[in-house]
Image (spheres, helix red, strand yellow):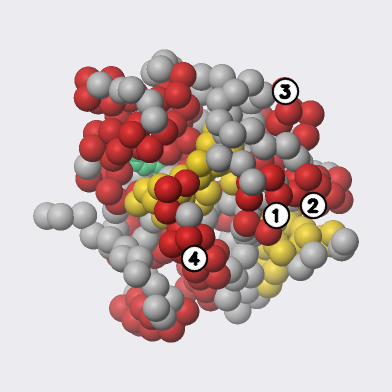
Amino acid sequence: MSVKPYELTDAGGATCQGMITVDGYPVPNFMEDGIVRGKTILSIREWKIRDDDIVVKSLPKSGNRWVDEILNMLLSRKTEMEAGRKFALIEQTTEKNFESTPSPRVISTHLPLRYLPKQLEQKKTKMVLVLRNPKDCAVSYYHVMTGMRVFNYSGKFENFLKLYIDGKLPFGDMFSYIREFEEKMNSESDKICLVMYEDLKMNGVQEIQRLARFLGVDATEEFCKTVHDACSFRNFAEKREFTTPVNEMVWKEGGCFYRKGIIGDWKNHFTVADSEMFDEVLAQRMTGSKLKFTYSAPE
Ligand code: A3P
C-alpha cells in the first residue's frame, strides 16, 4: 500500500494542492489527515454491506448530492433535506460511522469499483449510476478546484481542462470510470439504474418515479412531485449548502457546490478549439460505448 502527498502543476504553471494518491489513484485530502484517510480508503474493501443499501456512484460534479437526496427522500418518505444522513461520501467517513448508520443507507461515492466493499459482489445491493455530460462536469469541477481553499488552485480553464482529460485530478480518469461501469451495467442490469443529470433536469418527476420503481418504493405521482420540488436547485442552494462541516472548512468566499445547476454552461467556458479537441478525445476513449450525453437543453 502506498499513500503519498500529491501536487499538480498545470501547463500554465499554476499548482494544485490538497491531494493524496492511494496506490497511484488521486483523491482529495479531505480531512487534513491524508495518510489516515488514504488507509481508510484502502480499508473500505472490507466494510460490511447490507442487502438494502443503495450505492450512488458518480464522477465528481454529476449531480451526486441531488440524486442522493432524492433517494433518501423516497426511502424515508420524508421530504426534509438530509433526513437521516450521517455521511456524504463513503470515502469521507469512518468504518464506525458507516456501521452505525441505520438502514436503509444511501451510500454515495466517486470511487471506482475496485475500492468499494467486496461484499457488493455477493449482496443484492442496488446501485444508481449518475452521469452528466462531461463538458458541464469539467466546468463544474473547475469551479470546485478553484473555489475550495484546500486545493489552492487558480489556473486558467484551458489548462485545467488538460488535467481533467488526462485523469490527473482527484478521482482520476473519467473515461475508464464510465467504461468500467458501462460494462457492469451490461452484466447486472437488474441491480443498476442509470440516471442522467440532464434527464433529471428536463423530466424530473418521471425520473423520480422511475427511481421509486427501481427501489421498489410505493410512491404516488403526487409524492414524487413533492420530492421533485423539495430537491429543486433553489432549495438546494438555500438549504443544503454549508450543512456539513467540510463545506465551511474548505470554500473560498463565493464558492459553493450549488453554483448554476444548468445544462450547457460549458459553452461559456470552452473555446471552439477546446470543444473540438474534447469531442475528439471523447470519441477515441469511448469507442464502442452506447452512452449518449446531452449537451444542450431544448430551446
Ligand atoms: P454546477 O456547478 O454546474 O452548478 P455533485 O453533487 O455531484 O457535486 O454535483 C454538483 C453539480 O450539480 C453542481 O453543478 C450543482 O449546482 C448541480 N446540482 C445540485 N443540485 C441540483 C439540483 N437540484 N438541480 C440542478 N442541478 C443541481
Q: Residue at x 50, y 45 (%)?
A: 127
Mark 3 or mark 2, earlier in chain: 2
The crowd level at tag 1 (other Cα within 10 Å; few <14, some 14-19, many 20+) is some
Can the viewer see residue 134 in this picture? yes
- Depth check, front residue: 218 or 32: 218
Instruction: Establish if 58 lies above or below 213.
Output: below
SS at badge 2: helix
Instruction: Name the residue beneath numbered marker 3.
Output: 100
Instruction: Name the residue beneath numbered marker 4.
Output: 183
SS at badge 4: helix
The crowd level at tag 3 (other Cα within 10 Å; few <14, some 14-19, many 20+) is few
Instruction: Name the residue beneath numbered marker 1.
Output: 115
- Which image quarter: residue 295? bottom left
Distance of mark 3 from mark 2, alpha carbons? Answer: 20 Å
Mark 3 or mark 4, earlier in chain: 3
Q: Is mark 2 within 8 Å of ligand 1?
A: no
Q: Residue at x 15, y 55 (%)?
A: 298
- Depth check, front residue: 261 or 72: 72
Distance of mark 2 from mark 4, alpha carbons? Answer: 23 Å
- The amino acid type found where label 4 is placed reads Glu
Left or right: where does residue 125 sit relative to residue 96? Answer: left
Instruction: Give the quarter of the figure containing the C terminus.
Output: bottom left
Instruction: Name the residue beneath numbered marker 2.
Output: 42
- The amino acid type found where label 1 is placed reads Tyr
Distance of mark 2 from mark 1, alpha carbons? Answer: 7 Å
Distance of mark 4 from mark 1, alpha carbons? Answer: 17 Å
